Amino acid sequence: LDVGGNIGYMAAVGGRQVGNKGLVLCFEPNPDVLPVLRENIKLNNLTNIDVMPVAAGDQEGSAQFFCGIESALSTLVANTGVLQVQKTIDVPVRMIDNVLVDKNISPNVFSLVKIDVEGYEYFALKGMQSVLKARKARFIVENNPPAQKALGVSMQDILNDFFYPYGYTIFWI
């Protein structure tokens, strides 16, 4: 799972690693980078990446998305203190658990989950409880304290609510 795919670098790396029998689900809500993401997938001849043009969250619906001058900093979090907002748009939001049900994909198939959603990691994780409970995947989770603080959460909350209860071992990079 690539949650916060941006232009697709990590999705392409994952697509090469899992090969033709594997699948990468790539979540990216920013319509400004979706054409670049799809072109990068095409240029790398990868047919095993399924792009989901939605944000990952803890409920179904839509949300304001703050598009930054630097696309990699775009976020669902207002007032991060880092982002220079170029425009604000509404984007669809999906719970990853529901996407997996809709696509008939077992949460047990994922070996790696990368989440880089500029402070919205807590809510993306809350919407993927089945993947966490399966304990098959390793997680790489970005830590963005200013954006998390704007939402009233912290990395410690992420660890306490999602990783420690399921017995994950934590490593810091």
Image: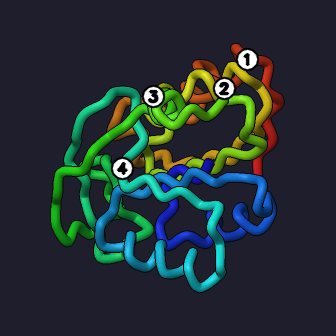
Q: Which residue is denoted by mark 1 in the rendering?
A: 166
Of pointers 1 and 3, the one earlier in the residue sequence: 3
Q: Amino acid at mark 1?
A: Tyr
> How far apart are labels 4 and 1 at the CA level?
27 Å
In the rendered image of this protein, does residue 53 appear above or below residue 95? below
User: Residue 27: percent from the left, percent from the top?
Assistant: 47, 52
Q: Which residue is denoted by mark 2 in the rendering?
A: 132
Residue 95 found in image quarter: top left
Is there CB contact under 8 Å for labels 2 and 3?
Answer: no
Of pointers 1 and 2, the one earlier in the residue sequence: 2
Q: Amino acid at mark 4?
A: Val
Residue at x-position 48% and y-position 81%: 39
Residue at x-position 34% and y-position 54%: 75
Of pointers 4 and 1, the one earlier in the residue sequence: 4
User: What kind of element bears circle 3?
Assistant: helix
Q: Which residue is denoted by mark 4 in the rendering?
A: 54
Q: Amino acid at mark 2?
A: Leu
Q: Which residue is denoted by mark 3 in the rendering?
A: 98
Q: Nearer the viewer, mark 3 or mark 4?
A: 3
Residue 104 found in image quarter: top right
User: What kind of element bears circle 4?
Assistant: loop
